[in-house]
Image: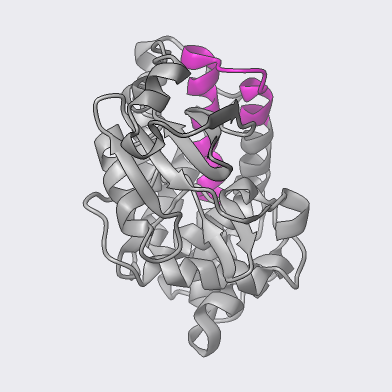
Amino acid sequence: MTAVPSIGDLLERVPSWVGRAVEWRRLDGGLSHHIFRVEADGQPYVLRVLEPAVSAAGLGIPPEQEIANTLLAAGSVGARVYAVLEDVPALVLEFLPGRTLSAAEVRRPEVVPALAEACRRLHAGPAFGNTFDIFAKRAELLDVCARHDLPLPDGYLDRSSTVDELRAALSVAPLPAVPCHNDLLAENFIATSDGVRIIDYQLSGNNDPAFELGDIAAEADYDPDLVERLADAYFGADRTPALLARVRLFQIASNVTWALWFTVHHGLLRAGDFDYQAEAADKWGQARRALDDPGLGDLLDTVTGRKTTTPKH
């Protein structure tokens, strides 16, 4: 990790804070970048200092792209951007007045429609300047692991042929790409008085919206009933068996790839007290069970049109 400029230096670089009574504290929860709450004359802001080593390790998009996407998302469902410090790089963001959701909360059935609505708002916004593909990210992270001799999760490459089947099936009739967050763990949702907002665009890019839903399901460990509820809330009357199966397959692909993300983070960065190795093992365990499940064939057939019945739980 690179050295972060002193907080005093950073505070002096924001013109609107000069001459004001400024207090700050580090915020918990960021797994990669450096996040602070800053109060200027009692007005709260978020200072997000981007760590270039994150994108260099394949764990995020380049800082300039994250900044651009954050600015675009501010017009739909993201936080307002008050200032950009391009040379640091860092962002001064609106402190959203609300509650950070937990994994338990996003598993509550009554919360699911609000998550779907937040995604629709983001997806209807202006397109980002980059694309994201979960299988391309997997290939990139595998290359990082090989170059740095990082140990893969147990049996990871043994399932590669099944992952290839997954990718081939999802390449059939892809949905039009929309601006996606691509990393919707619960803590990136903020419940506010005007709906759920979405923060932290570290892995954002234009993508198949079904991946966004599958990623939510993977991060919160949704069972098939909750996945169906999420797909119904997002697609409404347009939800077909193929769309539901598509979301469920992307749920698997998310766990497959993010297991490597945590493996690389543990091997190269190891920031803070978070147990990246344990998280990699947990995600791979979930992925492996899904890849070995006899019902996977039905999902693949439904997505490709070889089968038209609703996937079984």
Q: Is residue 132 visible?
A: no
- Outermost residue on the front side: it is 19
Colour style of the rendered protein structure: one colour
Q: Is residue 204 above or below residue 310?
A: above
Q: Quadrant of residue 29?
A: top right
Q: Is residue 134 visible?
A: yes
Q: Viewer-proximal residue, 153 or 131?
A: 131
Q: Is residue 61 above or below residue 175?
A: above
Q: Is residue 279 magenta?
A: yes
- Outermost residue on the bottom side: it is 237
Say left or right for 13 vs 271: left
User: Residue 248, image x and y in percent?
Assistant: 57, 61
Q: Main secondary structure of the magenta part?
A: helix
User: Residue 105, image x and y in percent?
Assistant: 75, 57
Question: Which quadrant would the N terminus be assigned to in this image?
Answer: top left
Question: Which quadrant would the C terminus be assigned to in this image?
Answer: bottom right
Q: Quadrant of residue 17?
A: top left
Say left or right for 255 vs 181: right
Which residue shows up at 53% across the image and 75% down it? 234
Which residue shows up at 64% across the image and 50% down it? 186
Say left or right for 69 vs 232: left
Say left or right for 123 vs 287: left
User: Residue 100, image x and y in percent?
Assistant: 66, 50
Q: Viewer-proximal residue, 40 or 123?
A: 40
Q: Viewer-proximal residue, 93 or 51?
A: 93
- Number of numbered discs: 0
Q: Which residues are magenta?
A: 252-281
User: Residue 101, image x and y in percent?
Assistant: 69, 53
Q: Is residue 50 magenta?
A: no
